[in-house]
Image: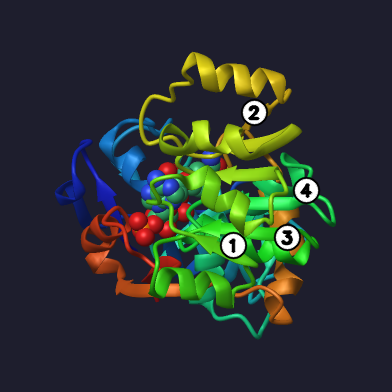
Amino acid sequence: MKAIRYHEHGDADVLTMDDVLEPTPGPEEVTVRVHAAGVNPIDTYVREGNVSPEDGLPHIGGADVAGVVEEAGEGADAFEPGDRVFATGLGLFEPGTYAEYVSVSESKLAPLPESVSFEEGAAAAMAFATAWRGLVTRGDLSVGDVCLVQGGSGGVGHAGVQIARHAGATVVATAREGEPAEMVRELGADAVVDYRADDLPTEIREATGGDPVDVVLEPHAASNLVDDLDVLVRSGRITLIGEDEEIRIPPGAAMTGKIADADLRFMSIMASTDDQGPILRSVAPLLGDGTFEARIAKTYPLSEAPAAQRDVLSGGTLGKIVLEVT
Ligand SMILES: NC(=O)c1ccc[n+]([C@@H]2O[C@H](COP(=O)([O-])OP(=O)(O)OC[C@H]3O[C@@H](n4cnc5c(N)ncnc54)[C@H](OP(=O)(O)O)[C@@H]3O)[C@@H](O)[C@H]2O)c1
């Protein structure tokens, strides 16, 4: 089969299209014919060697898959050949999804509704699993909460806005003015604030009518944590999913956090969880009936994975970048 691999860590130029053996499913695994693969920032961190893959080099990256079950392994009885499925959390501890076939533990899989295209399934997988885990599982988001979704026009953020709205929260999101902010409003945010604002906490307070924030989904903690603490309710939760660089909490902000009994929670949808499958099984019917929508900014053929990975880090993406595989 064709697969995008890298034989050494480095920039996107290390990615090559190789001919490799098709995988066979292990116990409680199925092999999936990949129709579409999501492109995520973590794919680039793994490729660079910042999060080394355990199965060594050469490595096939890619966390998200949507496709059709080709073959079930011993003891795998929840899915049958021909079933449409999607999954996330691959490509770190095992070969990933930038390939025509991938073997996946059955526990990670969810059925993909007929009404959801493979491209949308691949776009949704990590974004919705991460936002759901960050807001619902780790963030304890409840009806009536005020929720701040940072990076609302990005992959995880646009899923977070929809999940928070569906949970019955008041949703304030950050996104750049113009098209990004418009998209976030369309997806259900009650208010949108430009993350580049000079005084972000004041703008967030104005957007909430002065109410403090109960739960924050934070993909850029190094930039925003101090502001998040400033707007947080007493005992509020901040789920930190990304940091970009070292997170610093200066003394004044640390005191604000202490006074607020602020609750900082971390998570990794790749490494700190085995609930990707159950979460996607909750998300799937909501994608199927149109409650949730995975926005696709751009698709690339598998052969153009290097360009797709450059694009995912370039900024300005509205939703997700997806590889069309077969
Ligand atoms: N812990 C986990 O389990 C987990 C899972 C998935 C992703 N992540 C991490 O979360 C981060 C976001 O992932 P993603 O897939 O959503 O990436 P993405 O699609 O590139 O989205 C990032 C979003 O953040 C916005 N943004 C940039 N700088 C910002 C700032 N200072 N404050 C607020 N928003 C800002 C971007 O807006 P513009 O493009 O308009 O500038 C963009 O909308 C990445 O670091 C990723 O590695 C973590």
Measuring 48% from the left and 35% from the top, which residue is drawn there?
221
Residue 241 is left or right of residue 38, and the answer is: right
Q: Is 149 situated above or below 242?
A: below
Counting residues from the start of the chain, the first of labels 4 and 3 encountered is 4
Q: Horizontal and vertical percent for residue 32?
A: 54, 64
In the picture of the structure, the residue carrying the numbered disc 2 is 264
- Disc 2 to disc 4, C-alpha distance: 14 Å
Q: Is 246 situated above or below 114?
A: above
Task: For ligand 1, tell me if the residue under mark 4 lies within 8 Å.
Answer: no
Badge 2 crowding class, 10 Å Cα cut-off, few under 14, some 14 to 19, many 20 or more, is some
- Disc 2 to disc 1, C-alpha distance: 21 Å
In the picture of the structure, the residue carrying the numbered disc 1 is 159
Q: Nearer the viewer, mark 4 or mark 3?
A: 3
In the picture of the structure, the residue carrying the numbered disc 3 is 170
Counting residues from the start of the chain, the first of labels 2 and 4 encountered is 4
Residue type at mark 1?
Ala
Residue 172 is left or right of residue 122, and the answer is: right
Badge 3 crowding class, 10 Å Cα cut-off, few under 14, some 14 to 19, many 20 or more, is many
Q: Horizontal and vertical percent for residue 296?
A: 44, 74
In the picture of the structure, the residue carrying the numbered disc 4 is 141
- Disc 2 to disc 3, C-alpha distance: 20 Å
Element type where label 1 sits in the image = helix
